[in-house]
Image (spheres, helix red, strand yellow):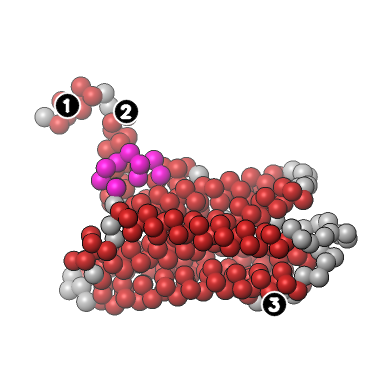
């Protein structure tokens, strides 16, 4: 929470970070704060106490925000990879192609697409009835364990879940993967060894987190829903619910020199009086 909140504040207050890359990073950090606020508090309360109860309404609310934010993150990550592709592979056209209007359109499309997909899934799940066991075999309210508890015919819901998982993970993942392939190909042409190492360090970190995020989602939602895979699915779910909010601030921003400089400058503004700043600047 602290890392993501810090990034959002820096992007808002520092003029040097008013660029497309940091605009998307600010959106991602805002999304991650909502993400962990929706899942982790209830999960931690269940781990530390015996309070493992949640109402059906509360469960659907948690599922809605989880599904909405997860679908949005898939498209937001692909928008960020496209931004990096333009910046590295087509630098002369970057300012024209990735203007303010384009940035806003990509961000809005990411948030709206996630909302449409989740509302579609939720509207179908609300038709389910529950008349048997009421113990969710998971640490949060996801579609798969909720569907298993229903005594209704779940064929349509399972098919829709598979289709939405396919639509919201595979195309953005392929776009992200393609962007990074072009980026890595361009980086290999950099004559400076130091420049190549620096670019590869950033790109490889991004690609590892993105691949882990998409890979875990596709395994959980697109493989057969069997009892043998239920424990594996819970472990894999950690890779797209807990890992990204922790890793993204470190990989995308806090290792970045511009973010570090902005942080030092703004901390100095807060801690050092204005008169002393004038003396130091002289």
- Between the C-alphas of marks 3 and 2, the distance is 56 Å
Q: Earlier in the sequence, mark 1 or mark 3?
A: 3
- Residue 154, label in figure: none
Which residue, given by chain and number where applicable, does mark 1 sit on? 278
> Where residue 131 sits: x, y (%)?
88, 59
Q: Main secondary structure of the magenta part?
A: helix
| In the displayed structure image, the side of residue 68 where residue 11 appears, left or right | left
Total labels drawn: 3
- Residue 224, label in figure: 3
Vertical order, 84 against 272 (above or below):
below
Vertical order, 32 against 268 (above or below):
below
The structure residue drawn at horizontal position 57% and vertical position 49%, both measured from the top left corner, is: 36
The structure residue drawn at horizontal position 42% and vertical position 66%, both measured from the top left corner, is: 78
> Where residue 210 sits: x, y (%)?
46, 66
From where the camera sits, is residue 215 visible? no
The structure residue drawn at horizontal position 61% and vertical position 55%, both measured from the top left corner, is: 66
* Range drawn in magenta: 8-18
Q: Earlier in the sequence, mark 1 or mark 2?
A: 2
Q: In the image, is residue 16 part of the stretch drawn in magenta?
A: yes
The structure residue drawn at horizontal position 38% and vertical position 76%, both measured from the top left corner, is: 178
> Where residue 196 sits: x, y (%)?
25, 70
Give the SS element for disc 1. helix
**Pair 1/3: label in front:** 3
Give the SS element for disc 3. loop
Quarter of the figure with residue 94: bottom left
Which residue, given by chain and number where applicable, does mark 2 sit on? 271
- Between the C-alphas of marks 1 and 3, the distance is 65 Å
From where the camera sits, is residue 27 visible? yes
**Pair 3/2: label in front:** 3
Q: Which residue is more in the foreground, 85 or 43?
A: 85
């Amino acid at each position: 929470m602290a890392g993501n909140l810090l990034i959002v504040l820096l992007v808002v207050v520092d003029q040097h970070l008013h660029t497309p890359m940091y605009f998307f990073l600010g959106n991602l950090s805002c999304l991650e704060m909502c993400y962990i606020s929706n899942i982790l508090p209830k999960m931690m309360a269940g781990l530390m106490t015996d309070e493992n109860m949640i109402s059906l309404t509360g469960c659907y609310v948690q599922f809605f925000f989880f599904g909405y934010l997860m679908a949005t993150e898939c498209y937001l990550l692909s928008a960020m990879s496209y931004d990096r592709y333009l910046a590295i592979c087509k630098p002369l056209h970057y300012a024209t192609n990735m203007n303010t209007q384009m940035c806003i359109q990509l961000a809005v499309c990411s948030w709206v697409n996630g909302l449409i997909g989740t509302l579609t899934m939720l509207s179908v799940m609300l038709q389910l009835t529950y008349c048997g066991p009421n113990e969710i075999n998971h640490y949060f309210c996801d579609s798969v364990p909720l569907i298993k508890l229903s005594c209704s015919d779940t064929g349509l819901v399972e098919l829709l879940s598979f289709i939405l998982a396919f639509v919201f993970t595979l195309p953005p993942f392929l776009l992200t993967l393609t962007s990074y392939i072009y980026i890595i190909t361009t980086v290999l042409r950099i004559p400076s060894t130091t420049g190549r190492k620096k670019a590869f360090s950033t790109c490889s970190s991004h690609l590892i987190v993105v691949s882990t995020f998409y890979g875990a989602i596709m395994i959980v939602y697109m493989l057969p829903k069997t009892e043998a895979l239920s424990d594996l699915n819970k472990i894999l779910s950690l890779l797209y619910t807990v890992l990204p909010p922790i890793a993204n601030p470190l990989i995308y921003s806090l290792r970045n020199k511009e973010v570090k400089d902005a942080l030092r400058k703004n901390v100095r503004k807060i801690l050092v009086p204005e008169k002393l700043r004038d003396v130091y600047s002289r």
